[in-house]
Structure formats: C-alpha cells, structure tokens
Amino acid sequence: MKILCHHIYEYKKGLRSLVLHTLATEYLREAELRLKRNNIPYIIRQVNETKVNIFFGDRSCVAVVASFGDKPLNALTSEEDFILGIMLGYSRIEQCRRYLKRSRLNPYAANRATVHDTVALRSVSA
C-alpha cells in the first residue's frame, strides 16, 4: 500500500496523468477507499485470481483505458498498447519502436533508399 500512496501522491502533484498499479486482490477494498477519499477516477481490471490492475488518474485518460474493454494487457492491439504506454509516461521513442515491432511494420521498408540517402547526406555535410 506504500507504493499506492506514492502513486497517489505523484498523481496529485501532477507528475503522472495516469497510473497503472497492480496489487493483490486482498488489498483492493483499501485501495478503492483511498482513491474514493481522494476523489480520483479509476477502473479495475482483473489480472488473475489473486491480482488486479487499477488504472487511475485524469478522468479522460481513465476513459480511454476503459474504452479498450476488459481484455488483458497482452491482448491490446498495437495501437491501444501504444496509446497506453504514452499515457503512462513511457519513452515515446521506445513506444514507437514497440509499436513497429508489435505491428510487424518495418520503419524503413517503404523508403529504405531515402532513409539511407538522408543518412549519407548528413554524414557528408557534417
């Protein structure tokens, strides 16, 4: 529960817009009470019989997560995974790489020569 309190603190201070907090189901009631007491929007997603994920934070961010439905995180589409990662504050560059890998897109496939030409021009002009 100390980590949950820290996440709430970070959200209230504006360090995070959305938090994903995983905890044992035995602590769910206490977690909900803390979130309600602080008037923080949240949704709960079951991970398994013993764990839940609580997404909480800005109402619009929570609404976006809710729009993904009840599916487990590993079942999110590449686009949903990208959106969630960005909202959780993960590196934009890493999220772009992850999206390309998950969606099986090759970032250079369509313009491979153009990309190499650009790289070559930069190294010549540098």
Image (cartoon, rainbow, N blue to C red):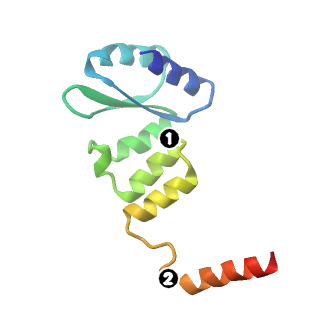
Q: Which residue does the image show at 44% across and 64% down from the upper left? A: 100
Residue pointed to by mark 1: 88
**How far is mark 2 from mark 1, CA to CA?**
31 Å
Residue 80 locus on image (x, y percent): 40, 53
Question: Which of the two labelled residues, at mark 2 and mark 1, occupies the earlier sequence position?
Answer: 1
Residue pointed to by mark 2: 110
Q: Quadrant of the C terminus?
A: bottom right
Residue 114 locus on image (x, y percent): 61, 84
Q: Which residue does the image show at 56% across and 27% down from the upper left? A: 11
Q: Which residue does the image show at 46% across and 20% down from the upper left? A: 3
Which mark lies nearer to you, 2 or 1?
2
Q: Is residue 55 above or below residue 35?
A: below
Sort mark 2 into few (<14), some (14-19) or many (20+) by Cα contacts within 10 Å.
few
Residue toward you, 111 or 75: 111
Tag 2 secondary structure: loop
Q: Is residue 82 above or below residue 114?
A: above
Residue 54 locus on image (x, y percent): 37, 29
Q: Amino acid at mark 1?
A: Leu
Q: Quadrant of the N terminus?
A: top left
Residue 83 locus on image (x, y percent): 46, 51
Image side of residue 116 versus residue 100, left or right: right
> Quadrant of the rendered structure where residue 65 is?
top left
